[in-house]
Amino acid sequence: MKVCTDACLFGAWVAGYVKQHPHYKQVLDIGAGTGILSLMLAQQSNANIDAIEIEADCAAQAKENIEASPWANRIQVIHGDIHYFKPAQPYSFILSNPPFYDNDLKADDDAKNKAKHATHLSLKELFCITRKWLRPDGEAAFLLPYHRYKESLKLCNENFLYEQHVIHISQTQAHNPFRTILKVGQHKAKPCIENFSIKINDAYSSEAMLLLKSYYLAL
């Protein structure tokens, strides 16, 4: 499965945030894919991570990737449906890079549809599930399409989740945002809102390099 730069930026940002908040011991990765976000998080923190993935091939790949890593003892891969998942306790932090597209044209491959389209898990369901399994003092972060940012805020608020930090991501300063990192919590506060450019001209921006240097060998 291809890993996109925006997903890596999201993973790096979340990993850095959780590292700064070491009391976030129990983490849930919803829609873990091949495990890249969980691995990035485990690399930077001491958290124990449950990584749940519905698609069998992705879950198998995630398990293989994690077992080959130095952090296998802190990441549990769960092949299952988040709708029916019943953890032993709520989580202090939840992250997700959820399905992006509700109405766009779909591929013939059912696995790709589950990965890229909200055919199985809508944003409304995602935020409801997040609220259900998040500790009262916990936080959650999502990587979203920019054009669904305002819709996502509304759905989060309906579940008593409130924006704390927002990062709008553009390819360059000359482009409009195409992704948004949204971090929410269960208390209202004035959010920090930032704009982030992946590249300047043909090179990674200094902000992108700072996030990715621990994971990209070429930087």
Image (cartoon, grey):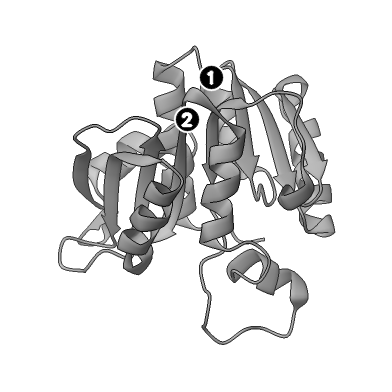
* Residue 195 x/y as whole percent: 20, 50
Task: Locate the C terminus and report the quarter of the image it occupies.
Answer: top left
Question: How dense is the environment of label 2, judged by Cα within 10 Å: few (below 14), some, or many (20 and up)?
Answer: many
Q: Nearer the viewer, residue 120 or 107?
A: 120
The amino acid marked with disc number 1 is Ser
User: Quarter of the image holding residue 211?
Assistant: top left
* Marker disc for residue 15: 2
* Mark 1 secondary-structure assignment: loop
Residue identified by numbered label 1: 45
Can residue 49 be seen in the rendering of this structure? yes
> Residue at 37% of width from left, 46% of height from top?
182
Do the CB atoms of the residues marked 1 and 2 lie less than 8 Å apart? Answer: yes
> Residue at 63% of width from left, 45% of height from top?
30
Q: Nearer the viewer, residue 11 or 98?
A: 98
Q: Report whether 217 appears left or right of 68.
A: left
* Residue 130 x/y as whole percent: 56, 42
Q: Report whether 89 appears left or right of 160.
A: right
* Residue 42 x/y as whole percent: 60, 26
* Mark 2 secondary-structure assignment: helix
Can residue 3 be seen in the rendering of this structure? no
* Residue 177 x/y as whole percent: 26, 63
The amino acid marked with disc number 2 is Ala
Query: Please, is residue 53 above or below residue 190 in the view?
Result: below
Q: Earlier in the sequence, mark 1 or mark 2?
A: 2
